[in-house]
Image: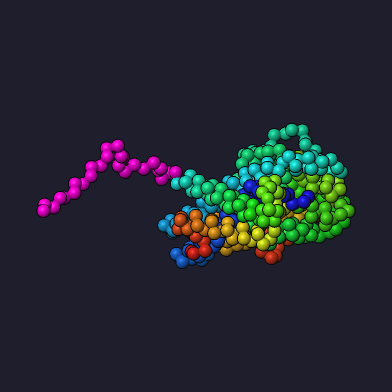
């Protein structure tokens, strides 16, 4: 899908948003320098994470840029989705016919039986996206093509799409007959899976119809025949032992630990004997120093990530072991080491 | 000659004393309004610069061409610089210009 040509207002607004993100990053760096100057370091931070936040609030309360940094973050969080949706609306008359044409093709989308989405999903506006993932008919396009490619990709270190390709490559085999992407969303990880495993049948499940509709466009444009399902990753309804690889990319930090465990149990059930999981997500808090934990937690608090702390504090290795996986490995990926990969094997 | 001591003008009773419209609990809203305004200023600046580029290229003003204009890298660099200066000016007023901290 070609990068959309935005109208002037939308393009300039997205550029402006990127400028705010840049200024936020600079203010955050200045904030951490000020923290250090006022005696807050990884070594002096309290053990309790909430107390770390309280300490920073207290010590920086008279430093004007502290409030301004929070204000910029708040504004960016609340407005990034709205701004991209408005940019889309300026060009929608031209774009929608192209998108509709991509609804048809070899990829299928099963909308399920209309089950009610679980509250851990329906009651959260992930990343503070106004109205949630399904807020508008083309939210999958807005987030998949505009938010991620024009804002997130610029704000995050490294190439966020190369990271997805790297995660896909961490699967130990290349001969899986069938692969399931849990939390497939708009297909940003499903696509590198399909490219890495061109002979495998690619399946994807997600709770958001709007996001999966965009994944369908991504696949159809390339002539790929994915099987997409609207449903819960923890209760797929798919036959046991039907996949060689079950995988996910940055799904876990969006869901509470009890659902993560249920998803790992479901993955185990879905795997054929000898199958693998590769689950990539945010770094584990227990692997980080106190300052890094505070930094992630601070960003999660402002960025609409209600489950981040609980998820990042979860012992994924122990949980996988309890479920029955073997050959369990966990590692972070270079260059930034800001992604944690859990790889494990179902006994043959 | 008798010096005339100027009388202190009386305060017009129609003028309020110490009136404060906004209250401290509206500070976040003020901050949001400033950023919304900053966005509009930047959008306008961007538009003018693009318009100039188009006019220079074609000799006439064509609105549709402005909207479909694909910003070349050199102009994008200038726009980014202008954007950062405008954002910096607003942040400076808030004692938070990141380039000076």
Q: Which residue appears farthest toward the top when viewing the image?
A: A114
Residue at x 80%, y 54% (from the top left corner): A193
Name the image quarter holding residue A109: top right
**Foreground residue among A71 and A123:** A71
Is A297 placed left or right of A204 in the picture?
Answer: left
Residue at x 62%, y 60% (from the top left corner): B78
Residue at x 71%, y 38% (from the top left corner): A137
**Foreground residue among A68 and A43:** A68
Name the image quarter holding residue B80: bottom right
**Foreground residue among A321 and B11:** B11
Q: Is residue A296 visible?
A: no
Give the answer, above or below, for where B59 lies relative to A106.
below
Give the answer, above or below, for where A113 lies relative to A129.
above
The span picked out in magenta is: B1-26
Is A177 placed left or right of B20 in the picture?
Answer: right
Q: What x and y, as percent, mark residue A264? A: 73, 49
């Amino acid at each position: 899908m070609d990068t959309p040509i935005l109208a002037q207002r939308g393009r300039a607004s997205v550029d402006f948003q990127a400028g705010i993100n840049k200024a936020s990053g600079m203010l955050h760096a200045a904030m951490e320098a000020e923290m250090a100057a006022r005696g807050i370091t990884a070594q002096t931070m309290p053990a309790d994470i909430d107390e770390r936040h309280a300490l920073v609030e207290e010590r920086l309360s008279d430093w004007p840029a502290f409030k301004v940094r929070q204000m910029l973050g708040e504004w960016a969080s609340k407005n990034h989705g709205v701004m991209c949706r408005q940019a889309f609306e300026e060009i929608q008359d031209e774009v929608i016919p192209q998108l509709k044409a991509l609804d048809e093709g070899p990829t299928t989308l099963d909308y399920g039986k209309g089950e009610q989405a679980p509250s851990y999903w329906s009651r959260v506006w992930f990343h503070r996206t106004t109205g949630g993932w399904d807020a508008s008919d083309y939210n999958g396009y807005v987030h998949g093509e505009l938010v991620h490619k024009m804002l997130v990709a610029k704000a995050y270190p490294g190439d966020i799409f190369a990271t997805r390709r790297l995660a896909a490559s961490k699967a130990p085999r290349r001969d899986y007959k069938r692969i399931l992407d849990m939390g497939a969303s708009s297909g940003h990880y499903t696509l590198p899976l399909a490219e890495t495993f061109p002979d495998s049948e690619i399946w994807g499940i997600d709770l958001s119809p709007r996001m999966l509709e965009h994944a369908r466009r991504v696949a159809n444009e390339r002539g790929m025949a994915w099987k997409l399902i609207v449903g819960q990753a923890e209760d797929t309804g798919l036959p046991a032992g039907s996949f060689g690889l079950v995988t996910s990319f940055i799904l876990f930090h969006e869901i509470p630990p009890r659902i993560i465990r249920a998803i790992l149990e479901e993955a185990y059930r879905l795997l054929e004997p000898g199958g693998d999981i590769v689950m990539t997500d945010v770094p584990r808090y227990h692997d980080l120093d106190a300052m890094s934990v505070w930094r992630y937690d601070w960003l999660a608090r402002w960025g609409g990530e209600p489950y981040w702390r609980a998820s990042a504090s979860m012992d994924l290795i122990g949980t996988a072991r309890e479920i029955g996986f073997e050959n369990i490995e966990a590692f972070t990926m270079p260059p930034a080491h800001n992604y944690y990969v859990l790889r494990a094997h179902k006994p043959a | 000659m008798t010096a005339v001591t100027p009388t202190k003008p009386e305060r017009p009773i129609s003028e309020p004393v110490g009136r404060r419209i906004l209250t401290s609990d509206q500070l976040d809203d003020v901050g949001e309004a400033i950023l919304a305004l900053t966005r509009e200023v930047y959008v306008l600046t961007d538009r003018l610069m693009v318009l100039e580029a188009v006019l220079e290229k074609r000799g006439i003003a064509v609105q549709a061409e402005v909207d479909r204009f694909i910003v070349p890298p050199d102009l994008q660099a200038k726009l980014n610089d202008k954007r950062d200066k405008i954002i910096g000016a607003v942040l400076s007023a808030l004692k938070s210009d990141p380039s000076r901290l």
